[in-house]
Amino acid sequence: MSSKNLDTLYRQVIMDHYKNPRNKGVLEDDSLTINMNNPTCGDRIQLTLKLEDGKVADAKFEGEGCSISMSSASMMTQAIKGKNIEQALKLSKVFSDMMLGKEYDEDDLDLGDIEALQGVSQFPARIKCATLAWKAMEKGVSEDKEEQE
């Protein structure tokens, strides 16, 4: 597949997640709620996570922002659901490395639609948009871990 066709495919995947977000909404009960925003562009996200037995049992998000931040949140919630916390954090590390243009080690991780965001690394001003939901997830896992200790 040519580079131009791949860029078009990636753009279509990003817009699909933006127009038809997966896991949009709020979890009730005893879920964690993490609010984050990107003051430079106005993106904001509320991520709710249900962590059970060392796993991400469920994840949903609400928010407003550009297509990059909202589609990244949609992709992230899809990718981490059902994963153990270590796998979710590893996915976040791989995604961060991808955004920074670093070599990343996928190992046995299935990045799925997340790979569509690779091109964002060429636009430094948009990296914070793409990583907002991931930073919220890391913060939530960290706060949960502190509560457990």
Image (cartoon, grey):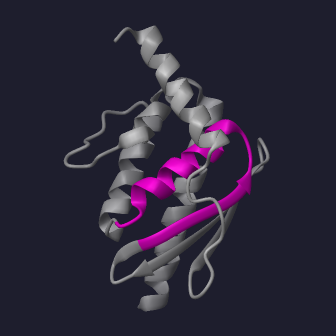
Q: Does the segment drawn in magenta span residue 66? A: yes
Q: Residue furthest left?
A: 108
For residue 7, side relative to residue 106 (left or right): right
Residue 131 x, y percent position in the rendering: 55, 47
**Image: 122 above or below 22:** above
For residue 78, side relative to residue 41 (left or right): left
What residue sits 20% from the left and 46% below the top? 107
For residue 45, side relative to residue 107 (left or right): right
Residue 25 seen in this snapshot: yes
Q: Does the segment drawn in magenta span residue 101? A: no
* Location of residue 84 (image quadrant): bottom left
Residue 38 x, y percent position in the rendering: 72, 50
Front residue of this view, candidates 46 and 148 = 46
Residue 42 x, y percent position in the rendering: 79, 47
Residue 29 x, y percent position in the rendering: 60, 87
Count the labels in the image. Answer: 0
**Image: 86 above or below 128:** below
Front residue of this view, candidates 42 and 48 = 48
What residue sits 77% from the left and 43% below the top? 40
What residue sits 37% from the left and 33% below the top? 102
- Locate the N terminus and report the quarter of the image it occupies: top left
* Location of residue 66 (image quadrant): top right
What residue sits 63% from the left and 81% below the top? 28
Front residue of this view, candidates 127 and 78 = 78
- Locate the C terminus and report the quarter of the image it occupies: bottom left
Region in magenta: 57-82
Residue 131 seen in this snapshot: no
**Image: 15 above or below 143:** above
Q: Residue furthest front?
A: 20
